[in-house]
Every structure is written in C-alpha cells, then in structure tokens.
C-alpha cells in the first residue's frame, strides 16, 4: 500500500499479516500517525470515533497510558498537517488549555510547526495564550521548557508574543517565563550547542518584558551597536550577559 502525503512525499506500507491492515482502519491514532487523512475522515464521518473522544493507540492498549484527545495526536504525532487541518476545520472541535500547551513542543519531525500553531491561535475556540495550566504556567512558560531550542521554537515564541502572551505572568511557584528559560537554556547551550537560538530567544523575551514594564523596572542599553535589554530578575540579567560574552568569543 503506497500512500502519498499532501507534501508530495510518499511512503510504502508493507503488511506481513492482514491484522496489521485491520489496525489502521480500526485505530484512529495509527491512522493519524501515518498521515492517512482519508481513513481518519471515514472514521469520523461514520461515527467510529468522535472528534473530541479521548483515545489511546492500539500499541498502547496493554500499557498504563492516559487517554488523550484525538486532536492531540493530530498536532503532535502526524507526519504532515492534513489530519490537523481537517480536525481543526470541524465546527464541533473542542480545544482546551492542554491542547494549546501541547502544540508548543519542538521535539521530533512530527511536532507542531509554527504555521500549525498560527492556525490554532486563530481558531475561535482556542483559549487565550495567557490561560494557565494546572501548574499555573502560561504558554510562554511551557515554551521555555521545550528543549532543544531551534528555529521552530523561536518562531513560536514570536507568534505567542504577537498574539498577546504576557512574559510578566508568574507560575504557581512564582517563576517568570524567563526564569524557566534561564534554567533550560544552560542545558541547551552546553549539550545541543544552541547559542544563537538561546541568545535571540532571550532577547525576544526580554524585549517583550520591556514592552510590558515601565522604565523604572527595565533598562535598555545599546552595546556594540545592538540593543541589549537588562530585566529583572538579576539571575536572568547575568545570564543574558554570559550569552553575549560567549557569542562574542565565537
């Protein structure tokens, strides 16, 4: 069975037993993971699965795995955007805070792209970007934990800020998004060699904080012909200085 994705890339599916074919047409998670939009549409239109059902993949039936909304797999597991766009176009789709935060992951080839996040943010049922999760974290907090940092993560950060994300909101434990970014960025620079992305993301977050703060709590300095922003807390301030010095040494 050869399936062609919307991007033009095709894949050859070889089945050793008929039961393997049956799983694809009975398991919506499997269909989404393979990017088989016609199979998913058939399941939804014939009421084999509800668009807001919480499901688990056939490969996980014997494990203690939490059931998750069907849309979660479309935004994080599908190799292209066809299943994601199809479910998002349905009028009865329900998008909660969990699904919004899940779209921020940058891991793997099947992770949500910046264009998918943009479509999600424009949907009328999508929660506000400043809606906290069960830990009091906003979307900027969640994105700051998504290592490795790359161009997709940077594009998502800009999208969130452009859609009203507030970098001054604190989590339940009293941390700003920049506080969380500070801790994880050290790992990103040391293990993944992500200095350029870390530097730019730190500046984007800092500039957003300046926009939200008054001149008494955030100072702008022009250093080496480029804008460098110093913000509270002090730990983040020294972190930005270390990024600058490390980048100049390269």
Image (cartoon, rainbow, N blue to C red):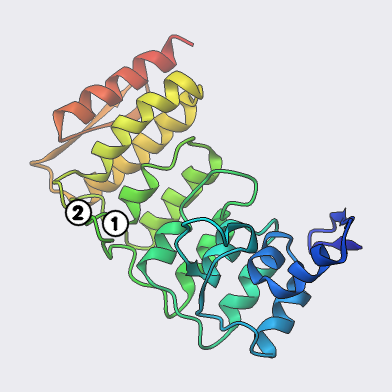
In screen coordinates, is 144 left or right of 115? left
Q: Is label 2 in a helix, a strand or a loop?
A: loop
- Compared to 6, does 86 lie above or below? below
In the figure, residue 31 lies in which quadrant?
bottom right
Residue 93 x, y percent position in the rendering: 50, 82
SS of the residue at dot 1?
Answer: loop
In which quarter of the view is residue 136 placed? bottom left
Give residue 166's position: percent from left, percent from top.
26, 56
Q: In screen coordinates, is 47 left or right of 64?
A: right
Considering depth in this image, is 166 or 4 the residue closer to the camera? 4
Q: Residue at x 32, y 37 (%)?
A: 181
Identify the disc placed on residue 138: 1
Residue mark closest to the camera, 1 vs 2: 1
Q: How many marks?
A: 2
- Identify the residue at the far top of this view: 249
Query: Who comes first in sequence, dot 1 or dot 2?
Result: 1
Say which mark, if any, is on residue 185: none
Circles 1, 2 touching at the beta carbon (< 8 Å): yes
Mark 2 neighbour density, 10 Å: few (under 14) some (14–19) many (20 or more): some
Q: Is residue 246 left or right of residue 241?
A: right
C-alpha span from label 1 to label 2:
8 Å
Toward which corner of the image does residue 49 lie, by quadrant? Answer: bottom right
Q: Which residue is mark 2?
A: 169
**Residue at point 87% right, 60% down?**
17
Quadrant for the N terminus, please: bottom right
- Residue 100: image x %, image y %? 42, 64
At a point 48% along the width and 67% down the height, the residue shown is 68
Tell me residue 77's x, y (percent).
61, 57
Q: Residue at x 37, y 42 (%)?
A: 145
């Amino acid at each position: 069975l050869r399936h062609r994705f919307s991007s033009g890339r095709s894949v050859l599916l070889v089945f050793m037993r008929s039961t393997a074919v049956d799983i694809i047409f009975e398991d919506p998670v499997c269909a989404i993971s393979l990017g088989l939009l016609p199979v998913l549409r058939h399941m939804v239109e014939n009421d084999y699965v509800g668009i807001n059902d919480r499901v688990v993949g056939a490969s996980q039936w014997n494990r203690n795995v939490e059931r998750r909304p069907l849309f979660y797999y479309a935004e994080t597991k599908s190799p292209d955007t066809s299943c994601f766009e199809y479910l998002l176009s349905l009028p009865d789709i329900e998008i909660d805070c969990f699904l919004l935060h899940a779209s921020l992951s940058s891991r793997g080839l099947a992770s949500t792209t910046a264009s998918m996040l943009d479509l999600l943010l424009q949907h009328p049922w999508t929660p506000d970007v400043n809606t906290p999760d069960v830990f009091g974290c906003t979307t900027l907090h969640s994105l700051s934990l998504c290592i490795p940092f790359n161009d997709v993560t940077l594009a998502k950060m800009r999208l969130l800020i452009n859609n009203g994300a507030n970098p001054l909101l604190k989590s339940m434990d009293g941390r700003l998004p920049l506080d969380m970014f500070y801790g994880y960025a050290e790992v990103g620079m040391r293990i993944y060699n992500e200095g350029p992305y870390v530097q730019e993301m730190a500046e984007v977050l800092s500039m957003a904080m300046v926009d939200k703060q008054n001149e008494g709590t955030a100072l702008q300095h022009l250093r080496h012909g480029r804008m460098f922003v110093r913000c509270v807390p002090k730990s983040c301030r020294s972190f930005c200085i270390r990024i600058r010095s490390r980048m100049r040494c390269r």
